[in-house]
Image: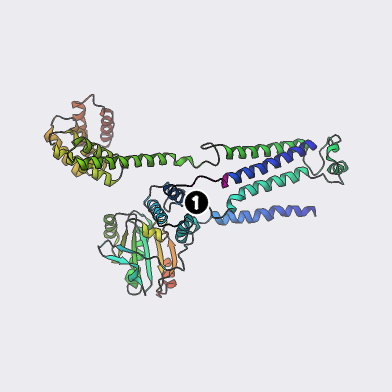
């Protein structure tokens, strides 16, 4: 039986090691953060009020943006992270905190694991019932010698040695897996942040780069308001955004480009696309008419007419007519497959 | 005493089962508001009609602060008749104030045209800072304030007539 006993103690040791490693991982120190990192860390610990399970740092909603703004404002006003968190708790209660307050909730899993291991150890190490099996009683006093005289039959009231070894093996396996999971680096370890947020972080980085590009081009345009290339790039930078303001700014710049060089049909296509994205069908149709006057043979004219007829007015008949004209005029255009699909869609509805 | 060990299982299992059953049956959004018993957070907002609505105007009489949005369907549509009736019946005894949550004023005006404009002011909370100050999770949410300016209750979700009667009694407006 001493083999089982030694394995059980080893298992207990591993559990303790896992508890210590877990505690160290939670309490490990890090470099002092910058103000932006600090604001981000505070927002990451606050729940976004109107979405399920996202932090205010990760959510694109208005209220999350307002939380981020207020956190930054309060930080700038010299308040501590705890004071800022408390100001949100005063309105939403502890619910707003993604991390539960206090250390108890963090310790419970480790304590529960340790308690489970202790119960397992007591169960495995307890002697058999003395009255039923005297040899088990002696074993508890002289464990080393008892191993050689261990009974072949399992003692009544206790599990068979095989079952004990299996139980200890499973327990050790679980504890080792838990410990390895905590020690492994991101993104494999249990300690890793949710991987779901990764695309969002990338989108936020791309958005920051776009805003920087807009700032830079605004500087260029301010220096030379008739720099067509810069105006065009600036329009593209705005149009890469998704908000109504971005689309409006992009459309204004394209209109400026058109007024600076009225003979160039190229900004028209972009302007019409912008209006269509904003679902501004009236302006899209007006711009298409202007393009038709400037460049009557352009396949863009039936292309946009068809799009506006189908998506703006659900007018399948006019849309099919325009799509057919486009397919006639520009059979090798890269947009042909898209128009074929839309034509089929309109034909099905007609 | 060997039988005593069998008591361990119910002693552990019964409280756990009770916690799970009661906990899982609760709506996670119905967290008690820490604002109850506190003075109502101050605000001053431009209204849909171009005027101003401020908490200072509410001093000295019971008030209802209702967060809503035109996109909040069907809940805000469902409770709208209750608000209209309350305004009609208690106009002189309770100040009803709307706060527009994360919405376009044009859409909100369209909502009022379609479902009825009771004439009470709706402040436009464009930045969301007022909703944040009130700990709003999502419309509709309604705060009931007594004549001393103390928040007495917060209601999550659409108000029914019975809800409204209970809350009005709580802030000292008898039928």
Quadrant the N terminus of chain A occupies? top right
- Residue B161 horizontal/vertical position (percent): 40, 66
Taking the image as shown, residue A335 lies to the left or right of residue A297, namely right
**Residue A290 or residue A160, whichever sits in front:** A290
Magenta stretch: includes residue A301 = no
Is residue A321 at all visible to an observer of this figure? no
Position of residue B128 relative to residue A314, above or below, is below
Question: How many neighbours does mark 1 have within 10 angstroms: few (below 14), some (14-19), or many (20 or more)?
Answer: some
Taking the image as shown, residue A174 lies to the left or right of residue A313, namely right
Chain letter behind tag 1: A
Residue beneath label 1, please? A98
- The kind of secondary structure the magenta stretch mainly shows is loop
Task: Please state the extent of the stretch shown in magenta in the rendering.
Answer: A25-33
Taking the image as shown, residue A60 lies to the left or right of residue A312, namely right
Secondary structure of residue under mark 1? loop
- Residue A214 horizontal/vertical position (percent): 28, 41
């Amino acid at each position: 039986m001493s083999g089982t006993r030694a394995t059980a103690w080893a298992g207990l040791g591993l559990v303790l090691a896992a508890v210590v490693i877990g505690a160290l991982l939670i309490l490990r120190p890090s470099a002092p953060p910058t103000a932006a990192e600090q604001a981000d860390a505070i927002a990451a610990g606050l729940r976004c009020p109107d979405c399920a399970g996202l932090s205010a740092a990760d959510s694109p909603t208005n209220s999350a943006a307002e939380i981020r703004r207020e956190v930054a404002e309060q930080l700038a006003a010299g308040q501590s992270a705890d004071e800022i968190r408390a100001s949100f708790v005063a309105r939403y209660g502890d619910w707003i905190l993604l991390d539960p307050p206090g250390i108890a909730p963090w310790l419970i899993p480790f304590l529960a694991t340790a308690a489970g291991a202790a119960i397992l150890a007591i169960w495995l190490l307890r002697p058999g019932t003395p009255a039923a099996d005297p040899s088990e009683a002696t074993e508890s006093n002289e464990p080393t010698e008892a191993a050689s005289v261990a009974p072949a039959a399992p003692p009544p009231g206790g599990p068979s040695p095989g079952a004990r070894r299996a139980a200890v093996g499973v327990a050790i396996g679980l504890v080792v897996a838990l410990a390895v999971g905590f020690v492994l680096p991101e993104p494999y370890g249990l300690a890793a942040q949710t991987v779901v947020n990764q695309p969002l972080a990338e989108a936020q980085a791309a958005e920051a780069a776009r805003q920087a590009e807009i700032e830079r081009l605004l500087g260029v345009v301010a220096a030379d308001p008739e720099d067509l290339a810069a105006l065009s790039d600036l329009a593209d930078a705005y149009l890469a955004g998704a908000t109504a303001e971005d689309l409006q700014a992009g459309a204004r710049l394209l209109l400026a480009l058109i007024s600076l060089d009225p003979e160039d049909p190229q900004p028209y296509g972009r302007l019409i696309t912008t209006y269509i994205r904003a679902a501004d069908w009236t302006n899209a149709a007006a711009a298409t008419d202007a393009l038709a006057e400037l460049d009557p043979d352009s396949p863009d004219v039936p292309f946009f007419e068809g799009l506006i007829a189908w998506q703006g007015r659900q007018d399948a008949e006019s849309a099919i007519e325009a799509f057919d004209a486009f397919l006639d005029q520009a059979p090798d255009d890269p947009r042909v497959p898209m128009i074929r699909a839309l034509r089929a869609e309109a034909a099905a509805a007609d | 005493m060997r039988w005593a060990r069998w008591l361990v299982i119910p002693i552990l299992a019964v409280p756990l089962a009770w916690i799970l059953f009661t906990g899982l049956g609760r709506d996670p959004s119905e967290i008690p508001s820490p604002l109850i018993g506190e003075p109502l957070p101050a605000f001053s907002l431009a209204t849909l009609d171009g005027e101003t609505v401020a908490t200072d105007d509410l001093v000295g009489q019971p008030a209802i602060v209702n967060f809503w949005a035109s996109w909040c369907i069907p809940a805000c549509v469902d409770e709208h008749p209750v608000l209209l009736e309350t305004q009609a019946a208690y106009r002189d005894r309770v100040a009803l104030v709307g706060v527009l949550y994360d919405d376009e004023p044009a859409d909100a005006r369209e909502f009022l045209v379609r479902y009825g404009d009771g004439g009470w002011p709706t402040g436009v909370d464009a930045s969301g800072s007022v909703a944040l100050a009130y700990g709003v999770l999502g419309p509709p949410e309604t705060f009931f304030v007594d004549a001393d300016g103390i928040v007495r209750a917060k209601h999550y979700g659409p108000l029914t007539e019975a809800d409204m009667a209970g809350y009005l009694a709580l802030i000292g407006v008898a039928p």
